[in-house]
Amino acid sequence: MTKLHKKLLALSPIAASLLLPISSTSLAHGYISKPESRGYLCRLNENSACGSVVYEPQSIEGRDGFPSAGPADGWLASAGHRAFSQLNQQSINRWTKRHVKAGATEFSWTFTAPHSTKDWRYFITKPDWNPNQVLSRDQFEAVPFCEYSGHFKQPPRQLTHLCNIPADRNGYHVVLGVWDVGDTPMSFYNAVDLMIDNGDVGSVEWVDVGDIFASRDLAKGDKVIARVFSESGEVASLAIELEILSALEGEKLRWPQQLAQLINQSQTWIQAGHINEDNDIEPTQGKNEIFAQRSSGITRVELAFELAPLPKPKFSAEGVKKHYYIDEGQVTFDVDVDISKPAQVTLALNKVGQQLQSKTFNLESGLTPLSLAVSQLQVGHYSLSVSYIAENGTSDKKHFHLDVLAKGDLPTEPEPITEAEYTFPQHLNQYKAGTLIYQPKTNKTYECKPWPYNGYCVQWSESANQYEPGVGQYWSMAWIEK
């Protein structure tokens, strides 16, 4: 019989740890929630193509003993966990970065299952690390820059450590936070991608990533926003917004310089202006260029404009009655319109959302009586709309519900005059964003909310009235009380 001889291979502690099963009985779970860790940003959908870590960023758990033992090089971000292997991908633009300043920085943990704790340790990449190579021990300092004892006690659900990020770090760096559990041979590893600002721009290599063009004047209340992008998408935390406070500030040669100054004051990895002989970037009047540090991972900066709404004139419509009577086959609707600016005003009679007849008037400012005579009307319910378009392009509209009766008829039930287009729940399928309805149950008027909530406005039946305006349990999700 042939004897089978088994040979034991001599493995390093690191390699051996990869062959050991990950504990499935450990009750401890937690993650760095500020600045948000790589895995937690996957959960928040700010990192993409992350795999299963989006469901459990609190579970990035591996063997303890880092840096002498623990996960293998290239597997540090996933703690050696193959289910989370996407976290090990590494390049300058792969991951969303949180922006901090060198020096005192808060690192907060959220524990979904606290456990006896030995300590927390924070390691940072070296000044000359290569962000386009996998995370390895050689990429990190061997000694933690910050360390806190756990005293073998359970931490609270939320815990914050104050750590001093080394002053010689600038640009993109990774902090590896290690939570060493006290009563199991396990630790939790969280990679935190940071853009560190230490204020030193003397030897920085700048890359042109955008321009501030002096192409238009802006008005008081307008806003211009510098939107910052990396290869993985927009970096919303770096957006810079300038609001124009006067017509003088809005002149096209002035606001670009003001925006450049605001960008430069906010941080150091993006600067705007013109580069001088000393590699300093100085804002100037007119066009300014936007630069980013080459190591920042920022690829472009775009400008977006939010124009202040134009002022609307004061506008009122009075004199509309609840009941009108057919007289010799005709009904005349009289309205007193008061508007503070010249405008084009239109009276329109509608039935079930369809316009029957209208008349347009060119008005100067002030109070003007208007009339709309309509023939061949039948007895029934109608709405009268009074709308305007002012000289500056602004517009508005008021709606009034009314009944047309035969001469000599008496109103069946008095109702208040409202600006509503419909009485709830009549013509339910006509409701859309901005529709005004009158609710008899509350004697109030409600407006259907804009997208994406307007879909709730048409969801109603006698047995399912949760979105009924002013009445249903969730009515405020769909309606605005006027």
Image (tube, helix red, strand yellow):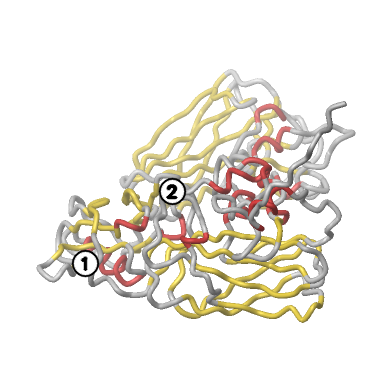
Residue under the point 46% across and 47% down: 94
Closest to the observer: 35 or 341? 35
Q: Is residue 407 left or right of 267 when viewed as pictured?
A: right
Q: Nearer the viewer, mark 1 or mark 2?
A: 2
* Secondary structure state at the residue bearing disc 2: loop
Q: Is residue 134 left or right of 64 when viewed as pictured?
A: left
Residue positioned most to the left: 277
In the rendered image of this protein, does residue 462 appear above or below residue 114?
Answer: above
Q: Which mark is residue 107?
A: none
Closest to the observer: 72 or 328? 72
Residue under the point 23% across and 53% down: 208
**Residue 340 figure quarter:** bottom left
Question: Residue 139 location, x and y as percent?
Answer: 46, 60
Determine contact: label 1, label 2, CB under 8 Å. no
Question: Residue 177 location, x and y as percent?
Answer: 60, 66
Question: Residue 172 location, x and y as percent?
Answer: 41, 61
Q: Is residue 213 left or right of 395 when viewed as pictured?
A: left
Closest to the observer: 464 or 135? 135
- Report the residue marked by disc 1: 248
- Report the residue marked by disc 2: 91
* Secondary structure state at the residue bearing disc 1: loop
Residue 310 appears in view: no
Q: Is residue 6 left or right of 172 when viewed as pictured?
A: right
